[in-house]
Image: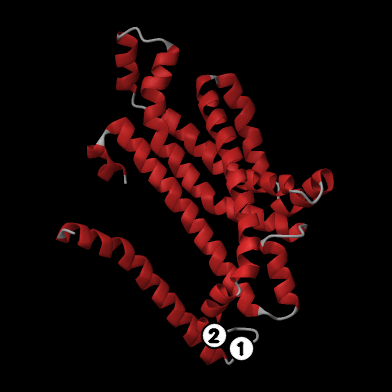
Amino acid sequence: MSRARIGNLVRTVGGPLLALTVLFVAYELWRRISGQPTFLVPDTPDVIVAAFTDVQTLWPAAWVTLKEAIYGLLLATAVGWTLGVVAQESKILEKAVMPYAVVSQAIPTLAIAPLLILWFGFTLLPKILVAALLCFFPILINTHAGMRSLESEYLDLMYSLEAGRWQTLFKVRLPAAVPFMFAGLKNGCVLAVVGALVAEWVGAHEGMGPLIIRSLGVFKTTIVFAAILYLSFMSIALFWVVSAIERLVLRILYGRQSISTAA
C-alpha cells in the first residue's frame, strides 16, 4: 500500500476515532464527577460488552428497525426525487406541491404516528410511512434545488442545438442535479432511522423502540446504551452505503477526475 493511500486512510479513519475517544473520555469523566449510580449511568466497558454479549436480543430488534428505515428511505426517495423533478418541469405542479410539502413538516411526527398506527395497525406499514414522512422533505428540497441550479449557459447551448425538453432534462438538468439529490438522500438516512424509532415508541411489538422502553422499565441501562450504539452504527452504515453509490454514479456521469472535486 502506497504512502498516499495510508495517509488517506489515516485521515479518513483517524478523525472519527479521535472524536469517539474524546466522547468516551468526556462521558467517563462526567459519570465519575456526577457520582451517578452505575444502574443509571453504566460504565463504558459494560456498554460495549452488552453490545456483543446481548447480540441475540439487540440484533433482531435492530434488524426490524433497520428494515423500517430502509423501506421508508426508499419510499421517500422515490416520491421526493419524482416530485422534485416534476416540480421543476411544471410551474403549476410546483405551486401545488411545494406548499403542502412544507405543511407536511409542520405536523409533529408524534401526532401523526398514532393515527397511522390506528389506521394500519401494528404492522410494518405505519413505521415505514413515518420514516418516509420524516426524511421526505430534505430529499425533495435538495432535488428541486439541484434541478434549478443549472447555469443559463447550458440551457442556451441546448436551445441553440434545438434540443427538446426531454433531451435537456436527461442530458443536462438531471446530471447537474445528481449531487444535490444524493445530498438530500444522505440527509434522509439519519432521519429515516429516527422516524422508524419514533413510530416504534408510539406503538410496536418489536424493534429498537419497544426494546428500549422495556429495558428502561427494569433499569437495564446497559441495554439502552447498547441499543443507542446500534442505532448510531445503523445510521452511519446507511450514510456510507449512499455515499458509495453516489461516488459510483458520479464516476459514471462525470468520470474519475471529478470525483475528488464532488467529494
Where does the N terminus fall, quadrant-wise?
A: bottom left
Q: Residues within 10 Å of mark 1 (few under 14, many from 20)?
A: few
**237 versus 72 height, above or below:** below
Tally of numbered discs: 2
Residue named by callout 1: 38
- Looking at marks 1 and 2 on the same chain, the residue that comes earlier in the sequence is marked by 1
Q: Residue at x 55, y 38 (%)?
A: 77
- Residue 223's x, y, as percent? 63, 75
Disc 2 on helix, strand or loop? loop
**104 versus 85 height, above or below:** below
> Between marks 1 and 2, how big is the CA–CA gap?
7 Å
In the picture, the disc for residue 69 is: none
Q: Residue at x 68, y 57 (%)?
A: 198
Q: Residue furthest front?
A: 56
Q: Residue at x 31, y 21 (%)?
A: 154
Which kind of residue does numbered mark 2 sit on?
Asp
**194 versus 251 height, above or below:** below
Task: Please name whichever residue, 21 or 180, is drawn nearer the observer in this view of the structure.
Answer: 21
Q: Give the side of residue 91 with respect to residue 251, left or right.
A: right
Q: Residues within 10 Å of mark 2 (few under 14, many from 20)?
A: some
**112 versus 2 height, above or below:** above
Which kind of residue does numbered mark 1 sit on?
Thr
Q: Give the side of residue 146 with respect to residue 126, left or right.
A: left
- Residue 56's x, y, as percent? 63, 69
Disc 1 on helix, strand or loop? loop
Mark 1 vs 2: CB contact within 8 A: yes
Residue named by callout 2: 43
Q: Give the side of residue 262 with respect to residue 35, left or right.
A: left
Q: Which of the 4 image quarters holds residue 18?
A: bottom left
